[in-house]
Image (cartoon, rainbow, N blue to C red):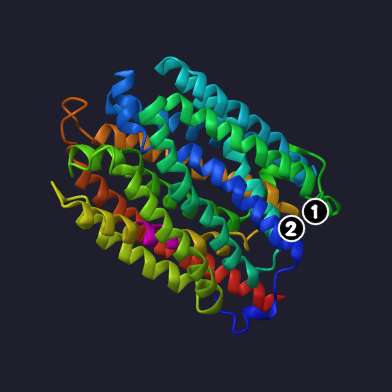
Amino acid sequence: MSNPNPEKIPFTGYQKLVIFLLTSTFFTVILDFMVLSPLGDIMMKSLKINATQFGIAVSSYAFSAGISGLLTAGFADKYDRKKLLLFFYTGFVIGTLFCGLAPTYELLVTARIFTGIFGGVIGSIAMAIVADIFSLQQRGKVMGFLQMGFGASQVLGIPFGLYVANSFGWHTTFILIAIIAAAIGLGLLIKLKPLTEHLSAQKTTSAFGHLINTFAQKNYRIGFFNTALLSIGGFMMMPFASAFCINNLKVTDEQMPIIFMVTGVATMAAMPLIGKLSDKVSKFKMFAFSTLMAIVIINIYARFTVTPFYIVLIINSVMMIFIMSRMVPSQALTSAIPNPADRGAFMSINSSLQQIAGGFGAMLAGFVIVQKDNFSPLEHYDYLAMITSAIMLFTIYGVSRINKIVEGENRNQ
């Protein structure tokens, strides 16, 4: 969609505060999940586990988050969104702390499941808050700022987490994330205003009925299906990124934080621009272009063997910019599908499918990847790139349908 005058709707002071709070929340939730990838090589060697077991550890969070989202979807529009966000964010903090205290692989998986139950719902609540507070013409820019949480996790969180893990052990990384998240939770408690306007639009008192009604709407199902495809493709290569760099490209442990820091800086710089272009030009065109560019780059990258560090650094940065550039316009369009009365349930189901599909992708990757021992190169990483590319092509069609739905609804208003 295009909007010729997006700048005519400036952010208020409170909207800017909400963006900061939600971006900070995204930072910790994304960091908690993303840090598993760069810590993957360290954790597999420390816990003496193989690629399949590590894939299960990654997917355990995703599956529990998905199930939790489905179970809570019917209640998502029944309460003040601020109270829901605080409840689940508190559980996320506790779960992350448990991850840092887990002494064995089995307890780590248990802690990841607990964290996923709470952490997996936070994104959907935040998206519902964005849709409540910001107009569609503002949401591309808002999504760009929220995705800066991803970039910030790479610039600040992941390099620091790797440094801490190398110096004090991977457990300390999760403990520090829990401490930072607790401070952000206090900010949400004090500064975020109650969000209850959606309560007056409720048509049913049954949580189960609300859930079924949300599933029953065709346009909603199109959004759900496309979200699942986006997640399967997005999660497949991610869990083994650090192991591929270290064991195949021969990047050193000391160089890995530099990769994540430079990639994060590039992503942070690009996301607000992508958000503005999505609002000004076309969300769908931005998505399609970014997807095609991402497909080209990941297939080149996945076939690298031992590679000079500066090339790895450049390719990683460009690849992540295009991958994340897909998320900004697609999330902005998807947020425009549900009616206000259904936003919480829609976002919860959408987040659940995102997590479950992502968990499936991570688990599938664990079965595709072959590694003879913890120090040998990964095999079949290029297979993952080809599977991911095929799924990405389908998402272009899916987002085009969502774009038509949103345009049709705006014309009817």
Q: Amino acid at mark 2?
A: Pro
The residue sitting at 65% across, 30% down in the picture is 91
Secondary element under disc 1, as helix, strand or loop, is: helix
Residue nearer the viewer, 242 or 214 = 242
Outermost residue to the front: 167
The residue sitting at 50% across, 45% down in the picture is 354
User: Which x, y percent locates residue 193?
Assistant: 81, 51
Q: Is residue 239 above or below residue 216?
A: above
Which segment did they paint magenta? Answer: 320-325
Q: Is residue 382 left or right of residue 174?
A: left
Residue nearer the viewer, 322 or 401 = 322
Q: Amino acid at mark 1?
A: His
The residue sitting at 18% across, 25% down in the picture is 373
The residue sitting at 63% across, 63% down in the picture is 336
Q: Which quarter of the figure is the N terminus placed in?
A: bottom right
Question: Do the residues bearing badges 1 and 2 touch, measured as CB atoms within 8 Å?
Answer: yes
Label 1 neighbourhood size at 10 Å, few (<14), some (14-19), many (20+)?
Answer: some
Quadrant of the rendered image containing residue 54: top left
| Residue 244 falls inside the magenta stretch | no
* Nearer-N-terminus badge (1/2): 1
Q: Is residue 142 above or below residue 80?
A: below
User: Which x, y percent locates residue 60?
Assistant: 46, 29
Disc 1 designates what residue? 198
Q: Can residue 75 be seen?
A: no
User: Which x, y percent locates residue 212?
Assistant: 67, 43
Disc 2 designates what residue? 340
Outermost residue to the left: 306
Q: Can residue 62 be seen?
A: yes
